[in-house]
Image: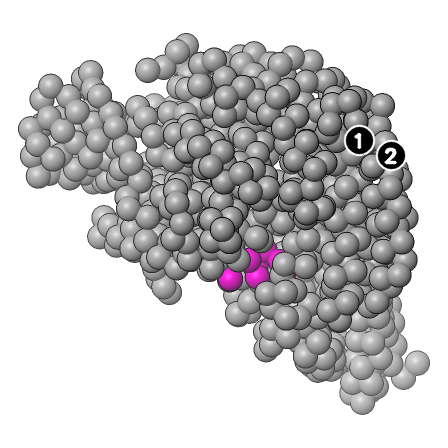
Amino acid sequence: MRENGYLPIRDYAAIGDGRTVALVGLDGSIDWLCLPNVDSGAVFARLLDAERGGSFQLAPAEPFEAERRYEQGSNVLQTIFRTTSGTTRVTDAMTLAPGETLVPQREIVRKIECLSGSTAFTWSIDPRFFFGRTRTRIERRGRRLIACSRAEALALGAWGAGEPSASETRMDGEFRLRDGEAALLSLTAAHHEPAFLPGRDDTEHRLRHTQAFWPRWIGRARYEGRWREAVLRSALVLKLLVFAPSGAIVAAPTTSLPEWIGGERNWDYRFTWLRDATYTLDALQTLGYEDEAHSFQWWLMHATRLTAPRLQVLYRVDGDVEADEKTVDGLAGYRGSSPVRAGNGAVKQVQLDIYGAVMHAIWLHAQHHGDLGGETGRAVARIADYVAEIWRQPDSGIWEVRSEPTDFIQSKAMCWVALDRAVRLAEAGFVPDRSERWRAEADEIRVFVDEHGWDQERGSYVRAVGLRELDASLLTLSLMDYTSADDPKLCGTIEAVRRELAAGPLVSRYRGEDGVRGDEGHFLTCSFWLADALARSGRIGEATELMDQLVDLANDVGLYAEEIDGESGAFLGNFPQGLTHLALIGAAVSIANAEDAR
Amino acid sequence: MSLAGAIVGGVVGTFVLTSSLRLMQVLGITRMDIPLLLGTVFSEDRRRATAIGYAVHFANGVVFSLGYAAVFSAVGQAGWLFGGLLGVVHAAFAGGTLVNILLPAVHPRMGTPWTDAEETPLLEPPGFMLMNYGRHTAIGTLLAHVAYGAIVGGFAAGL
């Protein structure tokens, strides 16, 4: 199952509590967990260093086969372990707080139940706080074991799981369960506060409460179209990526999972990208999650106040604008793919497309709520004024290339989207009306795109001025109503993307240079965008066929990474990837809408 | 030491404090918006919340000036310098405890570090020394409170 200590990325499933996310391997090892928050230092990072990363392992002591699923409509994971002597179910969850009771800051609960026969288990907790940069001590408090480092602590609760033993830096145990017996392990985290030492009943209560919450939450979803299971799973993934204290949504809960094994395209995605705002708000509102959409909109307008009218590419989940990129020394990287990075250098880039994404998101929100608020309206108008000033600048584009900024056509078109939505907002009375100027600049952008971004020979838009090559991000012109979806130029671009960038259902972002060495996989979001664009242009059959193929590419529990290796089918890049799941929802909804309109 | 002077100083000091924080917002130094933070305890409507928030903040300013007056009275001295020193303590309390911990604990629309997936707050928590609203918020808050304290101290001393 493991190769040199590493599991395939698709062998992981995610559990979380709205503050942080843990990745659980098919072999029962929790190999990724940042504490206290999703963007904090990792305490389990075996994902990025099989030897020194740290993990929470729990598995049968004898050879086993494992299969797993999420509980129905839930982010609580069940893994069934089968050995020659018995069958056991492990339920993994990060617990939520039931009401006004005293609860731990963060908690992982692992419940082990023997379903038949008997099975011997071993477990081992090897915490490495702050990516292993600080020393871990294991201390005893009465019968309890606590792992400490600086002002962080992890307290262990073990019931029916053997007598915990402690070495200098890890906690271990072994036990045997017989038919009908159950054991429970709880790991509670304390950040700058006393550790919480729950009893078994309390822990079981929190687990039951958590198990009850998720189906209740997903039960609010309004979606009855095709691929319902995949759409609802994607909604559950998005909910895991929402940082509940602020309403922000991280792109993915991991850092530095490589876009190519052994390559250096390893980025930290534990931030909120404004680019994703459109898709996020659209998905949440379409599925009926008004509260989450409203919360994200508030976060969006507050987080951007420090830099507005200039928008930063990404923000921390707490709204902080600092995200300087650093190398995390001491971790080998997933299968030797180094460096491991914390922070993201894209924070300092100019990416013009985000203005279109944000303005479209605001337009969606205003339509839905019927109001923006005066101060927000004025801020939005200032952003539109700013776009009218700067759209001629070169930028790093949607793909955050690390080569020199250039005039990306998709960026220019998204500036048109920004100004078009500003005009619509003004006409609807949501923002101060300076639409004459915005409309004039939007017209100029359209002329620019047609003059410099259209390749008559190829019959499609191209990546950038002077770069006569294709870029799958041009599919978003269809998604953002840059022009009507059956416009010949858009249809030509869709065809060209299929011809030059697609291999079966898989689509590459582009073929040209981007300032980073090495190869990368196929970008799953682009595949879903293609399905979306096909549906919007009326080619519902092709969109449906493509969607069927793409839905089959998910892992065994319905999750997607950022990219996929076309030859091996291995997942690549950070996982689970919010944008991929957002694009899946968007494509499914577009196909459903197209079918309804037919 | 004049109690009436301290109260008037509280009103003037709050005006200066609020205006200076607002100026910092406009200059892009901080995202902290005290009237909005306070007002959204009572209303989700931004306009109404901001109006309520200003009223609450001015009331708080007067209440705090009474605390300053009590300290001046107990110590037996008042003045802009001593008031400014109390402003440092006030800023540390406001940034470290009052707005950082107590406000999120009672605010129905603000997240806390304990907020989990079951909740969808509308306002991000301020963080230690309010630095979630921008790294320079701490120093701005300190200077604004020093100004407030100095004004209360100065008015209380009859300057």
Q: Residue at x 73, y 29 (%)?
A: A460
Which of B9/A318 is in front? A318
**A92 on left or right of A448:** left
Residue A522 x %, y %: 56, 22
Do the numbered discs 1 and 2 sit on residues whose CB atoms are within 8 Å?
Answer: yes
Which of A97/A157 is in front? A97
Which of A244/A205 is in front? A244
State the separation of the CA atoms marked 1 and 2: 6 Å
Based on the picture, tell me whether residue A328 belongs to the magenta stretch.
Answer: no
Residue A257 x %, y %: 53, 24
Q: Could one spot residue B67 in this view of the protein?
A: no
Which quadrant would residue B138 be assigned to in this image?
bottom right
Circle 1 chain: A
**A435 on left or right of A109:** right
> Callout 2 environment at 10 Å: few (<14), some (14 to 19), or many (20+)?
few
Could you tell me what secondary structure mostly forms the magenta stretch? helix
What residue span does the magenta drawing correspond to?
Answer: A290-298
Q: Which residue is mark 1?
A: A454
Amino acid type, callout 2: Glu
**What secondary structure is found at the residue carrying circle 2?**
helix
Q: Is residue A172 above or below residue B59?
A: above
Residue A301 x %, y %: 69, 58
**Which residue lies most toward the right here?**
B159
Which quadrant would residue A557 be assigned to in this image?
top left
Q: Which residue is mark 2?
A: A451
Q: Is residue B49 above or below residue A78?
A: below
Circle 2 chain: A
Amino acid type, callout 1: Trp
The number of callouts visible is 2
Based on the picture, tell me whether residue A293 belongs to the magenta stretch.
Answer: yes
Q: Residue at x 33, y 47 (%)?
A: A74
